[in-house]
Image (tube, grey):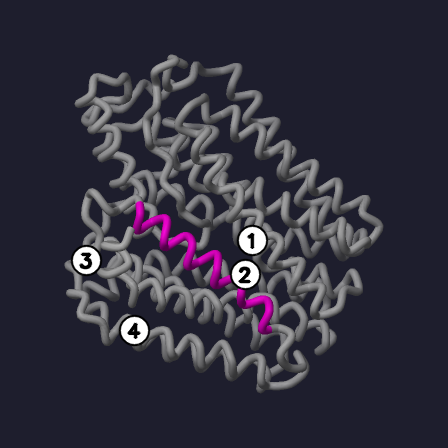
């Protein structure tokens, strides 16, 4: 761990500052939009625009990097991010915010791709798992700590938009000035949507529904809090609870994931998410119950991202894993674009409780499909007492294909190590039968 910190501290510090800036503006948009009298429907489209830009950027950034290099792409997109943050309070019109959010999502996606490729390049086979864990920690700590900054100034003013702009600008310094060698950039062509579905229907459907759940949490939580009459301090605590839950439950799910049928864990997490949504729905606006609901919802949903990737890997050979990660992220992105819009529609129809109703129903739908798939297919691995593979790699839904490919490399290395120790598992050249 010390070795990883020594070689990657600048990258991790940069990611931490980036996530503080992104987390702050994500919550601030909902609060400021309500102050500007944007409707819930307009705010949901503004939220969805970020994920549309992010998905588009994740497809375009690799080609941009190949053409002009990491440093130029990183600096250019960083400038766009800082500019957009300053423009939000200057042009307070829904149409302008939609456009700015597309640009913001596109730019952040490219910045993530660049930073993650540097991090992956700085990691060795032996340290990749630790690097991914530290990367996850930096992301989560950044988002959680950013919520406290909501309380340092009036959301109706300019200061809270200036702070993330400064933080994002500062985040580039440790990354660009570090001695880390600029990596050779390569990505694997994504597996087609049809191929992913054929290999793992649960992985395909699960990633789509999870994208819809995570986008609603990340983008609509502050909009819900404002509509429910929470104070700024309460909104910051509520959003923090969601991501604290995701951080706390990540590793217990990972530990169990490598020791039992992953579909059981998918089912448990989805049922838990649905029940936490019901708790929020019937909380009656009691803040303590809302905190508990948010904590449990985040704790049940966030680990599903890495869990579903690991589950799909169970049916793939190591040669196919990197390609699958790109396809899975695309499917997840499609769900993320749709999620906020549907959540906004539900909140418009039934009020703030539509936020919880939506999360509960989508989680229940995932649970039902997981239960159905368990009747259609045997587990990838026979449950044996001595089976103790390490294949779950921590990764957060905000990651791009680069982080996912790093996780796939970590997974593949462990599979090969297990094979060398004569432990049953998928071969490194052949995929399991997808039927």
Left or right of 312, for residue 122: left
Q: State which tag comes first along the sequence, 2 or 1.
A: 2
Q: CA distance from mark 4 to mark 1?
A: 25 Å
Give SS at disc 1: helix
Q: Residues within 10 Å of mark 4 (few under 14, many from 20)?
A: some
**Secondary structure state at the residue bearing disc 3:** loop
Label 1 – label 3 distance at C-alpha: 31 Å
Instruction: Report whether 271 appears left or right of 231.
Output: left
**Between discs 3 and 4, the one toward the N terminus:** 4
How many residues crowd around disc 1 within 10 Å: few (fewer than 14), some, or many (20 or more)? many
- Which numbered disc, 4 or 2, marks the residue that appears first in the sequence? 2
State which tag comes first along the sequence, 4 or 1: 4
Above-or-below relation of 129 to 121: above
Point out residue 51 in the picture as x, y percentages from the top left corner.
Answer: 49, 58
Question: Mark 4–mark 1 contact, CB under 8 Å?
Answer: no
Is 142 colored magenta in this rendering? yes
Q: How far from the left and from the top, in percent, is residue 77?
A: 35, 73
Q: Nearer the viewer, residue 215 or 154?
A: 154
> Magenta part mainly helix, strand or loop?
helix
Seen at 64% across and 35% down, the residue is 272
- For residue 79, above or below residue 384: below
Disc ID at residue 174: 4
Region rendered in magenta: 130-149
Question: Marks 1 and 2: in contact by CB < 8 Å?
Answer: yes
Q: Which residue is mark 2?
A: 144
């Amino acid at each position: 761990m010390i070795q990883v910190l020594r070689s990657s501290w600048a990258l991790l510090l940069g990611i931490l500052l980036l996530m503080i800036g992104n987390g702050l503006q994500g919550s601030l948009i909902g609060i400021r939009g309500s102050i500007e009298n944007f409707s819930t429907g307009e705010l949901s489209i503004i939220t969805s625009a970020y994920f549309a830009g992010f998905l588009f950027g994740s497809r375009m950034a690799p080609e941009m990097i190949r053409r002009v290099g990491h440093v130029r792409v990183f600096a250019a997109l960083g400038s766009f991010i800082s500019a957009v943050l300053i423009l939000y309070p200057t042009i307070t019109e829904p149409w302008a915010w939609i456009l700015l959010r597309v640009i913001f999502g596109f730019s952040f996606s490219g910045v993530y791709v660049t930073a993650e490729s540097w991090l992956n390049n700085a990691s060795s086979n032996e340290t990749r798992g630790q690097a991914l864990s530290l990367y996850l920690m930096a992301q989560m700590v950044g988002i959680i700590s950013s919520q406290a900054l909501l309380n340092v100034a009036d959301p109706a003013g300019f200061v809270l938009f200036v702070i993330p702009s400064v933080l994002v600008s500062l985040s580039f310094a440790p990354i660009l000035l570090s001695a880390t060698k600029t990596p050779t950039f390569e990505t694997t062509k994504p597996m087609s949507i049809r191929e992913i579905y054929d290999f793992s229907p649960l992985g395909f459907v699960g990633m789509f529904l999870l994208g819809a759940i995570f986008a609603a949490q990340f983008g609509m939580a502050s909009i819900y809090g404002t509509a429910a009459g929470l104070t700024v301090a309460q909104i910051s605590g509520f959003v923090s609870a969601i991501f604290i839950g995701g951080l706390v439950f990540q590793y217990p799910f990972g530990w169990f994931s490598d020791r039992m049928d992953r579909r059981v864990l998918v089912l448990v997490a989805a049922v838990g998410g649905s029940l936490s949504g019901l708790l929020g729905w019937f909380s009656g606006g009691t803040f303590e119950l809302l905190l508990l609901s948010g904590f449990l919802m985040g704790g049940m949903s966030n680990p599903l991202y890495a869990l579903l990737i690991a589950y799909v890997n169970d049916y793939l050979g190591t040669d196919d894993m990197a390609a699958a990660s790109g396809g899975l992220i695309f499917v997840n992105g499609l769900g993320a674009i749709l999620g906020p819009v549907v959540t906004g529609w539900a909140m418009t129809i039934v009020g703030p409780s539509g936020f919880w109703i939506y999360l509960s129903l989508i989680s229940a739908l995932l649970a039902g499909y997981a239960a159905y798939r368990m009747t259609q297919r045997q587990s990838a691995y026979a449950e044996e007492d001595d089976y103790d593979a390490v294949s779950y790699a921590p990764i957060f839904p905000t990651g791009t294909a680069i982080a996912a490919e790093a996780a796939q490399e970590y997974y593949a290395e462990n599979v090969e190590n297990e094979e060398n120790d004569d432990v049953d598992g998928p071969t490194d050249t052949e995929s399991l039968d997808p039927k």
